[in-house]
Image: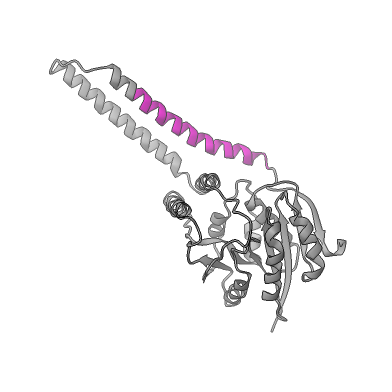
């Protein structure tokens, strides 16, 4: 049987309390004579001693393991891209992306590989349950996917996260997209390629706290919508037409009441409410337009999505 070369990309941000246990589970799960394993950890500007802990473990990891240390915190999307770029510099046949917090069980990677060997170029570890999440987070997540699928032209499935396997061809396609405002979940769908889903029961964090807050979810939703849809701009046009039609109807009604029936229509309250309503609608429209213009401005600078401070390899230990 041909030996498969698999690169494991592990984005890390303040995961020092989990990293030792992560390696203790990952390496035995991937020990096979038919698999050449290469572990690529990407430190996304952590403020803990996670890099030092990984560095100490490098010599005990499979050949080719390394740490890509970014110059600052660029966000998980950029860290994933940095890991994929590093993986493409190797001779890997496929790449698996997995978080270091152990919510993604390393033992499930073998199931992803089996589906890949059967012909699927993208194999997703689909989350079967969100029982470990809070009620508010489950509610917000469901609404997030409904909103995204309503506004976006790219379908996204609740439960499909970053824990997945990509063939080398899929990784090359994904890395060719160098936009700064990256919504990787949408990019996975955008590049296409045959997809298989493996139901996986995710686990609770071994230690530490999640860095994902409500503000991150809102920012992610805005990023997803503006990256894959112009429907908010169209909705602003529709809202303007509706408001214009309502204003015309109201003006016609006031004119009719005044000149036909001779009734005096109270002016202050109606004018005040109309001004507030139109002012709010205009500000929303300007905000939506500004969001798109701002992203265009940032993309026009052509800055790289991330900067690498250094790469720590086994040979340097």
Which part of the image, by quadrant, shows the C terminus? Answer: bottom right
Query: Residue extending furthest left?
Result: 261
Residue at coordinates 55% horizontally, 36% vertically from top-left?
A: 293
Compared across the picture, whether 179 is left or right of 92 comes to left
Compared across the picture, whether 226 is left or right of 268 comes to right
Question: Is residue 72 in the magenta section?
Answer: no
User: Residue 55 sits in which quadrant?
Assistant: bottom right
Residue at coordinates 29% horizontally, 27% vertically from top-left?
A: 247
Nearest to the observer: residue 280 or residue 101: 101
Above-or-below relation of 240 to 81: above
Q: Is residue 93 visible?
A: no
| Residue 215: image location, x then y, percent | 54, 44
Q: Which residues are magenta?
A: 274-302
| Residue 21: image location, x then y, percent | 69, 66
Question: Is residue 295 in the magenta section?
Answer: yes
Query: Residue extending furthest bottom?
Result: 1
User: Residue 15 sits in which quadrant?
Assistant: bottom right
Above-or-below relation of 71 to 175: above
Compared across the picture, whether 271 is left or right of 235 comes to left
């Amino acid at each position: 049987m041909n030996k498969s070369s698999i690169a494991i990309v592990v984005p890390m941000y303040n995961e020092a309390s989990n990293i030792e246990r992560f390696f203790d589970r990952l390496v035995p799960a991937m020990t096979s004579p038919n698999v050449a394993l290469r572990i690529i950890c990407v430190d996304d500007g952590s403020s803990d001693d996670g890099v030092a802990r990984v560095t100490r473990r490098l010599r005990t990891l499979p050949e080719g393991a390394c740490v890509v240390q970014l110059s600052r915190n660029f966000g998980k999307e950029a860290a994933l891209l940095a890991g994929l770029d590093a993986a493409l510099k190797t001779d890997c046949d496929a790449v698996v992306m997995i978080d270091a917090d152990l919510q993604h069980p390393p033992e499930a990677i073998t199931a992803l590989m089996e589906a890949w060997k059967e012909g699927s170029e993208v194999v997703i570890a689909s989350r079967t349950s969100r029982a470990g999440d809070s009620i508010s987070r489950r509610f917000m997540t469901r609404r997030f996917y409904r909103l995204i699928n309503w506004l976006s032209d790219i379908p996204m499935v609740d439960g499909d996260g970053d824990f997945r396997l990509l063939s080398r061809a899929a990784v090359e396609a994904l890395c060719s997209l160098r936009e700064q405002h990256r919504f990787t979940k949408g990019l996975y769908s955008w590049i296409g390629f045959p997809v298989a889903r493996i139901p996986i029961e995710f686990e609770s964090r071994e230690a530490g706290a999640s860095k994902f807050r409500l503000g991150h979810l809102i920012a992610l939703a805005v990023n997803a919508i503006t990256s894959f849809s112009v429907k908010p701009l169209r909705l602003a046009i529709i809202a303007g037409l509706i408001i214009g039609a309502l204003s015309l109807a109201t003006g016609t009604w006031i004119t009719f009441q005044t000149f036909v029936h001779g009734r005096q229509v109270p002016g202050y309250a109606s004018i005040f409410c109309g001004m507030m309503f139109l002012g709010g609608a205009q500000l929303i429209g300007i905000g939506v337009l500004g969001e798109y213009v701002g992203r265009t401005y940032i993309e026009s600078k052509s800055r790289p999505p991330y900067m690498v401070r250094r790469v720590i390899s086994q040979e340097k230990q």
